[in-house]
Image: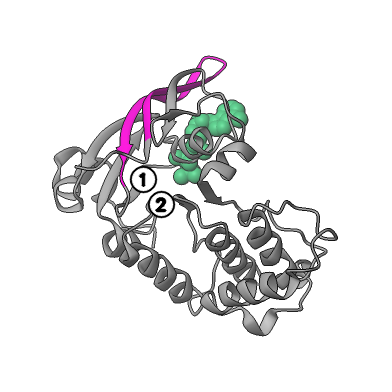
Amino acid sequence: MTTPSLSTRDLTIRFGGHVAVNQVSADFYPGTLTVIVGPNGAGKTTYFNLISGQLPATSGSVHLDGVDITRYGAARRTSMGVGRAFQLTNLFPNLSVIENVRLAVQSRAGIGMNMFSVWFSHKELISRAEHYLERVALADRRDTRVAALSHGDKRKLEVAILLALEPEVMMFDEPTAGMSVDEVPVVLDLIHQVKAERSKTVLLVEHKMDVVRSLADRIIVLHNGTLVADGNPVEVMASPIVQEAYLGAPEHA
Ligand SMILES: Nc1ncnc2c1ncn2[C@@H]1O[C@H](COP(=O)(O)OP(=O)(O)OP(=O)(O)O)[C@@H](O)[C@H]1O
């Protein structure tokens, strides 16, 4: 097996007396899409926050390509290749859709975030940004101010920004949450495409079991902050603990 691109070892965070993520160890590989499931409050988003650097670990470690990034902040992790579609918090609401993606393309190109500094390659940056907008079916909203977008279009824009950053590790936290039924396929198709390319390490937090079934190469189950199952979807779905605790009940979908 290849070297993991991302690893967590005994990763733990406490909030006062509450252990929200408890000694979670897992390796994530390029070309594999792992879905993290578990009941509300299981620690899925907190685990994501520990990986992307939004929260500092109480103990344990996070490694990217063998480098210990546990003490690195979120921005540094992003620049190293840990990309995450945030829940709308990384959008610039007063800029247009295309400018938001252009800034991500620019950041990926290592030019920096100063939008007034690099006129010489502006055309190329815009052309790259347009490519990503087309991929998420947002080309017709190109010049719309982000604040005026529908919720679903903002979520699609987040995905465009994530794609534009071309991260090695791509993290999606319920990417279709709050989307209308007709908007969902665009985002799911994109994640399918990313998965088909088989070069990225993809992590997905998802409640909708039909989405989990269609996308997962591997499923991790968290419960009370602890990893209770980890394996291929058929095995994990069939395991008694998962059947009883999470999958026996009617699905969230
Ligand atoms: N900043 C915080 N301070 C205190 N407690 C927190 C904080 N963030 C998360 N928690 C607690 O940690 C636990 C795990 O929360 P988390 O949001 O990670 O769960 P989740 O599995 O993502 O749930 P959901 O499916 O509802 O999104 C919960 O009990 C939550 O209340």
At which x and y percent is residue 36?
36, 45
Q: Main secondary structure of the magenta part?
A: strand
Quick check: is 166 in the magenta stretch? no
Q: Are marks 2 and 1 in contact (CB under 8 Å)?
A: yes
Identify the secondary structure beneath mark 2.
strand
Residue at the spot 38% in from the left edge and 42% down from the top edge: 39
Q: What residue lies at 50% left-to-right and 25% top-to-bottom?
A: 70
Count residues near mark 2 (Cα–Cα under 10 Å), then give few for <14, some for 14-19, many for 20+.
Answer: many
In depth, the one of 245 and 146 nearer the eye is 146
The kind of residue on which mark 2 rests is Leu
Q: Is residue 193 visible?
A: yes
Q: Which residue is mark 1?
A: 36
Residue beneath the point at 60% across and 75% down: 133
Task: Say which mark, if any, is on residue 204.
Answer: 2
Residue 223 horizontal side relative to residue 169, left or right: left
The answer to whether residue 162 is left or right of residue 59 is: right
Q: Residue at x 53, y 39 (%)?
A: 52
Distance Cα–Cα, label 2 vs label 1: 6 Å
Is residue 41 visible in the rendered structure shown here? no
Q: Earlier in the sequence, mark 2 or mark 1?
A: 1
Residue range highlighted in magenta: 7-29
> Residue 250: percent from the left, percent from the top?
30, 57
Q: Which mark is residue 134?
A: none
Residue situated in front as seen by the camera: 28 or 156: 28
In the rendered image, the quadrant that contains the C terminus is bottom left
The type of residue carrying mark 1 is: Ile
